[in-house]
Structure formats: C-alpha cells, structure tokens
Amino acid sequence: MSQSKVAKIYAESLYDYAVAQNNLENVITDVEKLKWLFVHSAELLRTVQSPIVRSIDKLAIIRGAAKNSLTTEFDGFINLLTKKNRIDFIPEIVEIFSDVCDKKEGVLRVTVTSAIALSDEQMQSVKDMLHVRFNKTIVITPLIDAELIGGFVVRVGDNVIDASIVNKLKQIKKKFINTSISLN
Amino acid sequence: MVDIRPDEITAIIRKQLSGYESEAVIYEVGTVLQVGDGIARVYGLSKVMASELVEFPNEVFGLVLNLEEDSVGCVLFGDCSLVKEGDIVKRTGKVASMPVGEALLGRVINPLGFPLDGKGIIETKHFLPIERKALGVLDRSPVKEPLQTGITAVDAMIPIGRGQRELIIGDRQTGKTAVAIDAIINQKSTHTEESKKLGINPVYCVYVAVGQKSSTVAQVVAKLHEHGAMDYTTVITASASDPAPLQFIAPYSGATVGEYFRDSGRHSLVIYDDLTKQAAAYRELSLLLRRPPGREAYPGDVFYLHSRLLERSSKLSDRLGGGSLTALPIIETQQGDVSAYIPTNVISITDGQIYLEPNLFNAGVRPAINVGISVSRVGGSAQIKALRKVAGSLKLDLAQYRELEAFAKFGSDLDSSTLNTLSRGARLVELLKQNQYVPIPIEKQVVSVFLGTSGLMDQVPVVDIKRYEKEFHEYAEMRYKDIYSAIRESKELKDDTINTIKKAAAELSSTFKKSE
C-alpha cells in the first residue's frame, strides 16, 4: 500500500510517454502482464527487489519472464529504470499505474454495495448521481451484501455514502437510546 | 407500579420517530491495517485531524495520535480484541470531548464522560474538548484568595491559593490521597449560607483517579458520600484495568470539567491522583506507537505531557470573571527519591510541594508532612492575615526544633533555652497532628496555632496536647464564642481577641486535669 514518490513520478512519466507515442493500450497490456507476473510469482518479485542481483540481470529476467514480447515503449522504460538504478521500484510502479491512468483520464472507480443485485437502470441512476457530484467518468464495481437489508452503500476512495436500511436502523436505535422517555 | 397501556407506548414511539428524517449519510472511512496492544494502524482516513475521535466496529472508539505519510496511528479506548484487521474505521469529525456542567456533580464517570455509577445518562448541553490550550498571560491574575484544606499544617505553613498548583509528593502509603480527600471534604464549608455571607465563593471539586484499584476509588467515593462531599464533586476514574489511553486522557478530562466552572466565574479544585501512573500509561502507548524512548524509557515529550496539563490551572483576571482552577497533582516516589525523572519534572512545573515522609508517618505524625522541605511559592499572599500572623513563629519554632532534635538524642546536658525550644517544638508537632476526614475550620486553626506558639500550652504535657486543644475549643465555644466569629469575619487576630484567648486558656488550665 505504500506509494513512494519515486514510483508515482515514474508511473506518470510512463503514462505521458505512452500517450505521446500513441500506444497507451499496448503499454497498459504490458503493465497488466507484469503485474500478473508479480502477483503469481513470489520468486520473481523477490529477485527484482533483491539488492544482491545486479540491475542488468534483473532487466534480463523481466524481459525473459515477459517472453521478450514487450512493446518498444515499455521495454525502453524498463531499460531507463535499469540505467537509473530504479528497477527495484518496478513492482510498485505497475501496482499504481492503473491509479495514475484513472487520475489522468478523470475516471473515478467506486464500489456500490447493495442487498440485492441492482438493475441496469438503477445502476445508471447511481452513476448519473455520482457523475453530477464528482464530475468524473464513473466506473462501478458492484458488490452484494445481504446484511444491508435494503438500499445501497457507495464507496469513493475514503468517502462513503451510506443509504442502506441497516444504517438507518442503527440511527433510529441511537436516537432511542439517547432520549429519555417520561411516562405521564 | 404505574400501569402502562400499550397504546401509550405506541404513542411515545411515534413521537420519538417523528423527528427522524431518513437521509443518506456521508462519512469518511479507513481500513485497519494492523491492530494489537491497544494500538491500531489505519490506512485511509486521509483528512483525519490529530487527536480526533474515530469509531471502530462494535462501538470501540479510538484517538488519532500519529499522522504518518500513508497511515494513521490510533489508540483504542476499548477492548482491542473486538477490532480486526480489515475493519472499517469511521471519522467522527470531533476532537475527543466530554460533557461538562452542573449535571456532572455527584457523578462517577470515565474519562470520556460515560457514567459508571448507574445513575443514568448525564443530561447536559455543554461539551468541551478534552485537550484545551492553556490561557495566556493577560487572561490571568495573581493568586489572591485562599483555598483552605482544613489541615492545620498545610493551611498555616504551606498555604494554597485558588488557582495554584501544589504538588503532593511522597512514597506509597504516606497519606497523599488522604490530604487530597481532606481538602475536598473541607470545601463543604464553602458551600454554606454562612460562607456566602462572608463572601467566600463555593469551590467545586474533581477527583481524577488514574491507574488505581477500583476498590480504592469505591472507598474514596463512599467516604465523600459519607461526608456529604459528593454534592459538589465529580469523580473521574480510569482504573488500573482500563486501557492505557483512558488513563492517559483522564487528567485532561478532569481539567476540562474544572475549566467549565473556572470559565463561568466560579472556583474549582482538581486532584490528579496520580500523575506517575499517567506518565507510565503515556510511556506505554508512546512505545507502542514506536516513538523513540528517552530517559527511563519515557518519550521526549513527557515534560510537555504534564506541563500542558498543569498550565491549565489558573486564576482568571476580573475581566474574564475571576474564576479559578486549583490543581493538586499527586506524585508517588520510590524510596523517597525525588530526583527521579517524573518527580523532578512535576516539581519544576508546580508552584510548590507538600512532601510526605514514611518516617514521620510511622512515628505517628499524621499527616506526615515534612514542613522543612515543603513549600508554597505563591500561596502566601492568599493566606488570611490572622493565620499569617501566628504561622510565622510556628515555622521558626519548628525549624529550630528540628535542628536541635538530633542533638537531644545524645542526651547530654542541655541548657534551659535549648530545653525550652525542644519542649515547645514537641508540643507544636503534637498540635499539628490531625485525624483523617476531620478538616478544621480556619478560625479554630488560628486559635490552636496561637495557643501553641504563644506558649500557652507549655505547661501541658505533650501527651495531653490534643486533649487540651479539644477541651479549649469546647470551652471557648461555650463561654467565649465571639473569638471564632471575630476571626472568621475580620480575618484578623486583634488584640482584644488575643486577650480573650489568653483569659480562656488561663481559666481552662486551672481546671485541666493532666493525665498521669
């Protein structure tokens, strides 16, 4: 979860470069490929982050792991990282690359949790509501949680919009506890 | 039993619900990364403030203490086993605050303001933050009114003024709490109609128990009830079994409760019992938050911990209503070592200290106050004239007595003036002995000290001193009642009062039966 500044700066540069070269889609595929590799091979991750292995060797290993099918843009990028002795950051860079893309393209990823699956129309109205609020392209990840009873909960980064029945019940409960009732 | 009809209940519920409007709630959240030892590390909560209250699941609350680059360090006020990794943490948007006001009097609460005495919710509209900034120079005025503890040794020689910070320091089992409790009980006299007529303003008390046994706190509360002192007292307790964060904030909560009275132009007395344990609790959570340890493993800001607390006690200027907050912090030393880290810190912050010694305690001198090294740096100006007049020679006589006492042990031949000093000293020491929970009114203190220092008791055997004192007060109350009222009203010891005392003493001495 730690996002070092170095990784962020390199990820942004990679994005800008890929856009300039008009090859963003392929670069994203490469990044995703590498991300998948790091997730599925702890060995590869350890090797890349190891201080004992030389940068040149790391480069060769990454190229080999990706079966030498990387785009020229991305290949050039990891070559630069090697030269600048920043290849250790590659796992972090690929991790945050999608966030950087979202930010640059004005995409907001939100999760919408509901008790039952929402219909397309309902989804669209939630999307429209969020679009008006944040003025960004909204990408929704739907989740189902029966414990909500009804309504929905939208999570946008650190902010939560809670319109669930369970939360309303909690509020009513709190209200009852906090008021004293006199019988007369 | 009131008969309750079901339709009434329905009506009540409907009434309660009528104010409820259903709306979507927006709040900020974070995720628990790591939890344990009463500490939680939270990812997210990007806009959280330092010392803000955050809510964990299962109604556990936490206080934000560390703001780091991409995580937040919180201390938990509840059971940390109820919080798991990955739990959602909500911001409350409030810095830790607590209810204050008259509704708190007579209550036993925890440092967050939740009642512990089973007397129901605290109904008050006033909330104040637990951590508040101390007042500046222009808002204060010098200490000028006395805060009487009812203990002769303290009121005569180590006088405390309203707005002062007087440290009570001593080993375990030397009667530190007893001094403080007596001071609370003595404030009862300030709540009477008579005091009102004399222009003495009532003092509201707060007793903060930090890291003590719950049984001890229960005893204190029972004693306060017994003496009718709970009517104007709030007890805040974070017992030894409560989590360290609660023990850490307890004194600040106490100061907040006291400040409410101070800021509304009234007077309050807050007792922090004791700050040694608070420092230990703060050390615990600082180390868990990975702050670097310093001397005795306390963090670097342990001085600030106590200085910012004690700076909050003050005497307000007349412009702000002239209220006051007096603090009696208690520090427990180990084997009489006042040069340990925490004792030296607190000694340097406070305006004087009352030093209690186990030797004196064991020798039967109770309260076991060592008047030689106890001082009050600002209270002198607050002492009433009558007591100041008689206390001057008391201090001197006792100082000479202590100096000669060591010699006298060798039993060599002593000249008559030395013998006089010794016998006077022994009588004064005896006179200053006092039982627990019996605060002495100031006018009686003046008369007693006068009897001792003027030599009116020199012929009374040392063992009879307390009895003589008691009989004198009884006799004078009966025959010369105006001695006391004169001192109480004029706050001075005039010549005619002195003559009456001498006359009464002469009369009593002629009939006083010395014990064999």
Image (cartoon, rainbow, N blue to C red):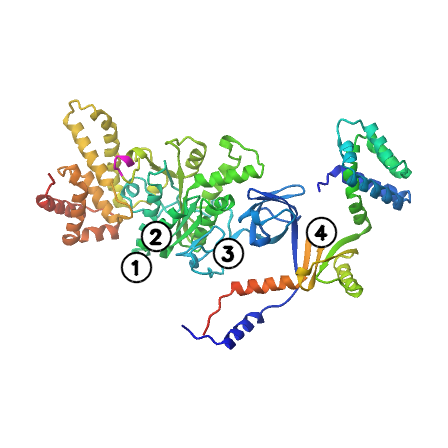
Q: CA distance from mark 2 to mark 1?
A: 25 Å
Q: Which residue is mark 3?
A: B127
Q: Secondary structure at mark 3?
A: strand
Q: Position of residue A143 (x, y in %)?
A: 73, 57
Q: CA distance from mark 1 to mark 4?
A: 62 Å
Question: Would you say residue B364 sits in the magenta stretch?
Answer: yes
- Residue type at mark 1? Glu
Please tell me whether mark 2 or mark 3 is closer to you in this view.
2
Q: Quadrant of the N terminus of chain A?
A: top right
The residue pinned by badge 2 equals B222
Q: Earlier in the sequence, mark 2 or mark 1?
A: 1
- Is B387 positioned to the left or the right of B104 in the image? left
- Label 4: chain letter: A
Q: What's the residue at 21%, 51% (across, down)?
A: B484
Q: Amino acid at mark 3?
A: Phe
Callout 4 secondary element:
loop
Can you tell which of label 3 and label 4 is closer to the viewer?
Answer: 4
Q: Earlier in the sequence, mark 2 or mark 3?
A: 3
Residue at mark 3 to residue at mark 4: CA–CA distance: 32 Å
Q: Is residue B29 left or right of B336 when viewed as pictured?
A: right
Which stretch did the figure color magenta?
B361-365
Tell me the number on the disc at residue B137: none
Q: Are marks 3 and 4 on the same chain?
A: no
